[in-house]
Amino acid sequence: MTPACEKVLEHLGQGPLPAELAAHARSCPFCAARLAVLGDLPAPSAPAPNATVKSALRDAVLKELAAHPVAPPWWREPVLLSGLCLAAVVLAVLWLGRHGPLVNNQASAPGLLITGALLFGVLLWGAFGAFAPGGRWLRNGLIAFSLEAAAVVALAGSGLDVPKGAFLAAGTGCALTEFGTSAVPLAITLWMLTRVAYQPQRAFAAGLTTGAVGMLALHLHCPCGALAHLALFHVVPWLALAGLAILIRSLLPSRTYAP
């Protein structure tokens, strides 16, 4: 199977094939056989696959059905991902607060409660949005909700700033902490996403979810509440992680091509 074949399979369920992929499908026995089974063969129709290809395809389908007669529920991965991210948040908070208070943010209690609830909502929403079949509306809503959460995090800080001359050093430490606490959940989530077809919105939702792990733990730990610090070293790394998730997932081969 060639890279072009993988692109054809990843495009299944997303509408008509682009001209370049349609031309490949018409000339490739591998793609022609699969698209013929799905009734999605682009016109003009490709020559009928030979008996050997048909037999191999039939055997592969029967073998897969015998091994997995019932498809696993789509919500299994979101539940696992939610549990993983929540456990990572707890471990990160305990680790960051091992030499002091677990909550070091000097913002008001209502402010902390609101920002924490918003980030917790992003974490759960993104976990389900990343895997929901046909849940494009769910992922679009997540993006809007996440931008709202990011604005609240930046604007609802305590206002306390770092000492003069320590802006960059303190900010770099916060950004690295956020990246570090989110790295393992992000890696596991991207591996889980290889069981479905690559879609940028799925990867972005997964990045927002796992980035919320570091964002939430860091927000509870960091005593600096200045707008510039929160925006540049808390919010921007979170959004950067979501963008990085798209790039990394695009480079990973898919294990299955479920839409």
Image (cartoon, rainbow, N blue to C red):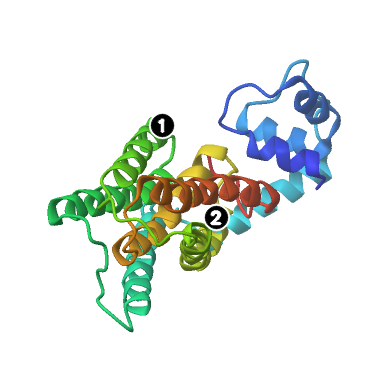
> Which residue is the site of mark 2?
65
* The image quarter in which residue 97 lies: bottom left
Q: Distance between the residues labelled 1 and 2?
A: 34 Å
Q: Where is residue 2 in the image (x, y as percent from the top left)?
A: 82, 45
Q: Residue at x 68, y 32 (%)?
A: 35
The front one of 229 and 81 is 229
The front one of 32 and 20 is 20
Q: Which amino acid does label 2 sit on?
A: Leu
For the residue labelled by badge 1, is the local secondary structure a helix, a strand or a loop?
helix
Q: Residue at x 32, y 67 (%)?
A: 221
For the residue labelled by badge 2, is the local secondary structure a helix, a strand or a loop?
helix
Dot 2 crowding, Cα within 10 Å, few <14, some 14–19, many 20+: few
Contact, mark 1 vs mark 2 (Cβ under 8 Å): no
| Residue 72 visible within the image | no
Q: In this view, does 212 lie above or below 146?
A: below
> Which residue is the site of mark 1?
140
